[in-house]
Amino acid sequence: MTKKIKVLHITFDMRIGGTEQVIVNLFKGSNSEQFDMSILCIESPLGPFADDLLASGVTITALSRQPGFDTSLISQIRQHIKQHKIDIVHCHQYTPYIYGVFAALMGPAKVIFTEHGRFYPDSGSWKRKLVNPLLNRFTHAVTAISKATKQALVEFENIPASSIEVLYNGIQGLAQSSDCLPALRTKLGVQNDEVCFGTVARLDPIKNQTLMIKSFDKALKNNLKAKLIIVGDGEEMPKLTALVSTLQIEHAVIFTGYEAKPAPYIALFDIYLLSSLSEGTSMTLLEAMSLSKPCIVTDAGGNPEIIQDQVNGLVTPNDDMQAFSEAMLALGTDPEAQDRMGKASKVRFDKLFSNSSMCSRFEEIYQSLR
């Protein structure tokens, strides 16, 4: 019997986010007969995504990174790698990568670095540009979740383009079910003649829900009959609710708060919105596509690689309220375009963004590094 390849995923923690969802999906979609996967978090507490994994028997180790560059963390990770005879160290995001590659130095474990997204505005530092090409020599594979993310690694991190592979995030598509929609529509007060715009995201400045709300307000003033459903919670909640109150559109904007299982809301939406200033590959955007939803997104990060303008949605210039509002008005008043773009979303999702596609490619990389 062939020995299983031991893969250690190193990340910050297992809170709710895109990076963590990718790790969960790798566990769900990878061949357990070929790969023995575990997780090492460099920060505590673990976060809610860890609960289901732990319940299913996944090994998750939590460390406590200290402020500054914590050299003791390198020793702890190195000891973990040796003790568990790890074959591949898969580092998610830059900081876990730094600790992971130093911990694996001079040992047999191979290192993979996956960059999941960038901050806005993006920037680099001379220290990182100096050290990253050296670290790259001890890195056996680098993946980026979009072409835009790859370009950022080249431009801001000085990592050679030739060593970076674009490997799109993949998810398990949401199940098509409409049984609960009439009750949910009634609960939220969405009328039959209203188009339902919606988003699922943490309420964070980087997601720019301020632009979304202002754009929606402008569309309403152009006689669009619509509701805006915002699913999620976060630091921007007080600011956003105050904005809605100031604009006097409380009747048309609904904040649901955090929903652990937002699939019914996504199924309810007629049009999915993503107004981010910066984005890697939005998992909820992919979920909306899997349910045949047309989407309106900003031209940020990986968004225009996922949504093809005028094909499965509309792409507007980044942080442009007028353009975003015009897109909402145009698509919101065109049911035929909604139907056509929604069908195109499902086709594009099945072709490029399924979980099986992502897992298969990572398995190929793991096997090649054995």
Image: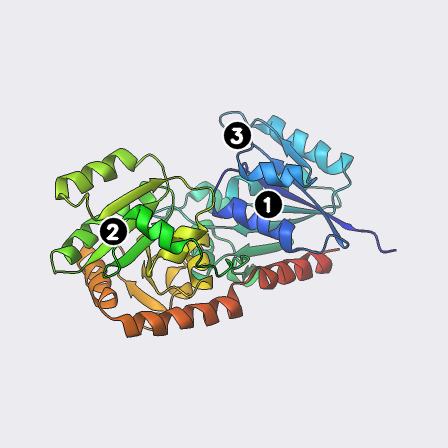
Looking at the picture, tell me which residue is in the foreground, 3 or 354.
Answer: 354
Residue type highlighted by circle 1? Cys
- Please identify the quadrant where the N terminus is shown: bottom right
Q: Earlier in the sequence, mark 2 or mark 3?
A: 3
Whether pointer 1 and pointer 2 mark residues with C-beta atoms closer than 8 Å, the reply is no
Question: Callout 1: few (<14), some (14-19), or many (20+) C-alpha neighbours within 10 Å?
Answer: many
Q: Which residue is mark 2?
A: 212
Residue 228 lies, in percent from the top left, at: 26, 51
Residue type at the position of mark 2: Met
Q: Earlier in the sequence, mark 1 or mark 2?
A: 1
Q: Secondary structure at mark 1?
A: strand
| Mark 2 in CB contact with mark 3 (< 8 angstroms) | no
Between residue 139 and residue 197, name the one nearer to us.
197
Q: Secondary structure at mark 3?
A: loop
Counting from the top left corner in percent of width and height, residue 47 is at 53, 34
Label drawn at residue 69: 3
Q: Tell me the amino acid under the disc marked 3.
A: Phe
The residue lying toward the viewer, choosing from 119 and 140, is: 119
> Is 267 left or right of 114, judged from the image as shown?
left
Which residue appears at 16% of the width and 39% of the height?
Answer: 245
**Could you tell me how far apart the alpha carbons at marks 2 and 3 are, in whole angstroms?**
38 Å
- The residue that appears at 72% across and 46% down in the rendered structure is 109
The residue under label 1 is: 91
Q: Which residue is at a point 58% across and 47% down the rendered structure image?
A: 23
- Whole-Å distance between the Cαs marked 1 and 3? 17 Å
